[in-house]
Amino acid sequence: MKRFFEIIIAFLMLVPISADAQSVGVVMSGGGAKGLYHIGVLRALEENGIPIDYISGTSMGSIVGGLYASGYTIEEMEEVALSGDLARWVSGSIDPKYSYFFIDRERITSMIRVSVGVEGNDMSQRPKVLLPGAMMNTAEIDLALNSFFTQASTGAQGDFDKLMIPFRCIGTDIQQHRAVELRSGDLARAIRASMALPVAFPPIEIDSVLMCDGGCYDNFPWKSLDESFHPDIIIGVCCTNMETPLNKNSSVVDQVMSLITKPSDFNLPEGRSVLIQRTVAASTLDFGKAAEIMADGYNDALAAMPEIKRLISRRMSNEEYAQRRVEFRSRCPKATIGEVNITGVNDNQRRIAERMMKIGSRGDEVLHAQEFSENYLSTLANGIARSEFPTFTYNYNTERYDVLLPLSARPHFDIALGGNISSTAFNQAYIGLNYNKIGRVGQSFHLDVLLGPVYTMARLWGRTTFILDMPLYVDYAFNFNIHNTLNGNFGNLTRVDNSAPIRMMENFIALAAGSAFERKSVVEFRLNTGSNSYRYSMDMYEKRQYTHFDYITPAVVLDRSTFNKPLFPTRGSHLMASAMYAYGRDRRDSKQESDMNVGENIDMVRQWWGVKALWEQYVGIDPREIFTLGYAVEGVYTTHPEFDSHEATMLSSPQYAPLLHSRMIYMPEFRADRYLGVGVMPTVRLYDNLYARLSIYGMLRDKFNGSVMHYMSDFSLIYHTPIGPVSLALTKYNLHNKNNLYLTFNFGYAIFGRKGLHY
């Protein structure tokens, strides 16, 4: 009898497994950006009709696997990977399109910003420096995960076995130091826990367990897949090898993950598995290589296809894949928003947040998830509060999603540090002290101090913001500026130096009221009153002249900007139009002048009006925006009078200064009461954040005795670092047959304050 059963077993082993009974599971490793490799593998499997019955994944593998299990097509996943959204989400920044321009307009760009305050809302605690819990702000990626998975989670009734493809993902219990299999609940929250890279992203709590990235303790969860679903065949997809040696250039995240990651078991069961593996040549957060990474996955899967087809005889057509998606998506309710419950902030902050998000003001009008997300991100981007992971729960009675929105109060105090390191005399050090409070209105006070041998500025100012459907604000400020070209060089490579020795000192009080009629536009009414002092030496005898102008200036300004960067932008546009009237007294005290230049005292009334318009835009020429073309038009028309001296007239006239270097030095040739300037700025992205930029500008000006044309050009290499741009520029001016050539290096932000006599 024993011999009989042995013969039967041997015979059965020779019989191929029935195609109908054959099941296939796919397991996907973590790896951050490397995990986009899985998308290429899925494309190859689907194109070859290989069925997928079960999926498990960790970290990025959980995101890709979760998307596929939720019915997303390969094309939809590729679109997300190539859009650049992933890179922005993991950068920790909220898309600038959600921030109000009127807030950023007055804020001086800093290199470092440190919060000072207390934890939560307990003001009885001693203030301290508040270090971030993670490198990245997860507001955008939290919303993105909810938008990707909430409907699928509802359609599956919180059971990951009821997704289009049964699914498992892995998180790490921080307290117990163990891997946790996530098989039910909020799918978005589960995937968020699975991808919470230590240091990069804050951990997240699930069922009172604090979790971080599942890759820490199980970066290749094939055993979870096998134990949960018992597939006949396992296809393993691994895009990383944590044993790969690091080097001194490895990212902080890669270093930390190497330290804390437990070695994973990549030994799939023999005879019923295929391993598709490559150590992808990219860092954990290098999402800019999405196309190449997905191509590697696709090609490696094709190379393994003969082995896969040998093991798997069953096939699934494109029509069957499409039918599965349609059937599952039909069970997923539409994304409309019901009640929103905001927690974690005081009543005033909650009411303002509700107003910003337009909660409760729409009656029975449907609020779609996309609109809610935009309003929510706008609230966060404009400093109303800080975010935690939101929860969307489907209400079967109202057929809408109710939202639990935990927020935390923004610290009241912060310190901003920045400035510019230059090869020229234009070095700067900047410190900003800021106080912000959200009560019934938004209230802030600021002290900005900028020190440098050429340009010094101090500004004490405050703002009261009335957060209505259309925000209104009132600004009040005292400003002090000194621009002194007597100090140092400006990178001159020629013997000709048109930077005259001048010193301009300005102090004024400003009062402004404005409104943001859309996020990126502001209309402002402004009143400045103050005094300008000009000292200049213009001849071979170094005779010093002094002119003072006391003024009052009302103005109206329309300003709109969608630039993606505060300096050297590559996308977006800037529109500005202004009108002003100036009234003041032009005074010259002969007693202050040198003995060789003693004259009569001057005390004359000067008044004029002026208008200015500026349009600057950058557009991508190719889909990947490797080449960007910028262009600009600027025009000024004023009735600016002549002062007692030609130099004082020039110093008080509008300035055409489109280049950074042109703002550093004094060039009377680029000042006039009426002018038209035109420029083109082609930019090429050489590698990631490295750009080459050519700028050419021409100016047609009224020079009292006729129109004159002047030119300036600049070729720059620019590298954008996380704390500011690094630039090397060769700048040339063509003036009166003088070929002025300058070579400058700058790191950081060269900062200039607002002028009292502005146009």
Image (cartoon, grey):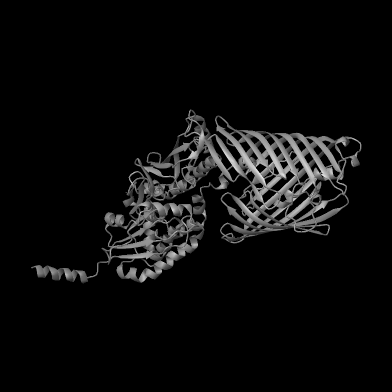
Against 31, residue 136 (above or below) is above
| Residue at far top of view | 124
Against 418, residue 312 (above or below) is below
Residue 736 relative to residue 746: left or right: right
Looking at the image, can residue 534 be seen? yes
Measured as percent of width and height from the top left, residue 237 is found at 37, 61
Looking at the image, can residue 759 be seen? no
Residue 655 relative to residue 34: left or right: right
Residue 569 relative to residue 217: left or right: right
Measured as percent of width and height from the top left, residue 439 is found at 55, 30
Measured as percent of width and height from the top left, residue 630 is found at 66, 56
- Location of the C terminus (image quadrant): top right
Closer to the camera, 419 or 4?
419
> What is the quadrant of residue 544 in the picture?
top right
Residue 470 relative to residue 667: left or right: left
Measured as percent of width and height from the top left, residue 317 is found at 37, 65
- Location of the N terminus (image quadrant): bottom left
| Residue at far left of view | 1
Q: Which residue occupies 51% across, 32% down?
A: 127
Q: Which residue occupies 87% across, 43% down?
A: 645
Closer to the camera, 155 or 264?
264
